[in-house]
Image (cartoon, grey):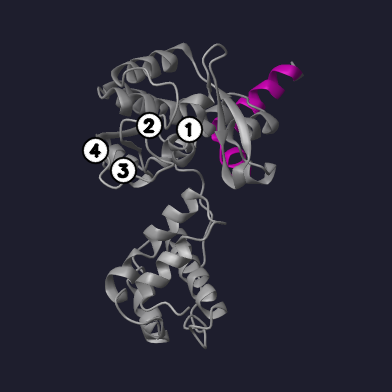
Amino acid sequence: MVASTIASALDRFLGRPQFSLRTRESYDQDLALIRRRIGDQPVAALTPEIAADYLAAQAHLAPSTYNRRFAALRSFIGWCMKQGWLVSNPLAQQERLPERRLPPRALNPADVHATLHSIRDRRDRALFWLIYEGGLRCREALAIDIEDINWTERGIVIRGKGQYRREVFFSKQISRYLDAYLGERGNPTTGPLFVTHRRAKNPRRTDVTPDGFARLSYRQADTLWKHYTPDWDVHQLRHTAITARAARGYTEVELKQFSGHQSLRSLEIYIAENREAAKRKAREWERNQE
């Protein structure tokens, strides 16, 4: 069956069962501009010129964001070609942008603590403290369900990239923040941990609490964080947490376990660029030679 419009093709593409909810939301956001601009047109309207215009509109973004949206469009186009709705690839002459891996954008831990202590909203305070203390990716924190929490041992099962699971442990301070937040919600025992303050208008069946509140999205969390710190990115909380532990003597294996990185090579940027860790090792060596 031929999709009548690009919008309907997008709906069918995103509705495939092999997509996780997180992947579906990410693709939907990345392809939103295509939907807005030419969603009411037939799939054949997705020409090389249209694809080029779409990518040109992303040129101001960071290379990593640009490439993510490029990949989303490429995936959609590839699927449309398999359906026989497109004869040729409109992205054939387009390329990804080169990415230069930068050192972690770590913040001053004292500044982070001051900002986090200033947050009064119980949900936001619990969320951002948990991201920072646990070294979590924002999406990992937002994916937590209440039943993932082991209150006795103060541990949480985290579903990371590729559905890789690890357990993180939180402090008594975080426990108090979570207790206060959940108490404000009536102490629910199941469902999404971090939810919107207002009931969802069109909730997804698997992503809403029994009383109608939807799981907080990444975009919503990022907007909240920008309210508290307009010049900081929410991902810097994780970078700062990992960098601080590298400076305080965590081994590569301990950093891997803490961060959820599946490769030790991914941690090189935290170790190689960490001046405090290098200085500490040098002083230890000096003392051992005396």
Nearest to N terminus: mark 4 or mark 2: 2
User: Start and end of the magenta stretch?
Assistant: 268-288
In the figure, residue 220 lies in which quadrant? top left
| Residue type indicated by callout 2 | Phe
For mark 1, what is the residue? 144
3D distance between C-alphas at marks 2 and 1: 8 Å
Nearest to N terminus: mark 1 or mark 4: 1
Nearest to N terminus: mark 1 or mark 3: 1
3D distance between C-alphas at marks 3 and 4: 11 Å
How packed mark 2 is, by other alpha carbons closer than 10 Å (few <14, some 14-19, many 20 or more), is many
Q: Which numbered dot is residue 89?
A: none
Q: Position of residue 87 (x, y in %)?
A: 52, 88
In the figure, residue 130 lies in which quadrant? top left
- Which is the main secondary structure of the residues drawn in magenta? helix
| Residue type indicated by callout 4 | His
3D distance between C-alphas at marks 1 and 4: 23 Å
Q: Position of residue 12 (x, y in %)?
A: 45, 66
Nearest to N terminus: mark 2 or mark 1: 1
Q: Nearer the viewer, mark 3 or mark 4?
A: 3
Q: Residue furthest front?
A: 1
- Indicate yes or no whether the magenta region holds residue 282: yes
For mark 2, what is the residue? 194
Cβ–Cβ below 8 Å for labels 3 and 4? Answer: no
Cβ–Cβ below 8 Å for labels 2 and 1? Answer: yes
Q: Nearer the viewer, mark 4 or mark 2?
A: 2
Residue at (36, 77) in percent of width and height:
5
Q: Nearer the viewer, mark 1 or mark 4?
A: 1
Q: Position of residue 68 (x, y in %)?
A: 47, 61
Q: Position of residue 109 (x, y in %)?
A: 41, 27
For mark 3, what is the residue? 220
Q: Residue furthest right?
A: 289
Q: Is residue 176 above or below residue 72?
A: above
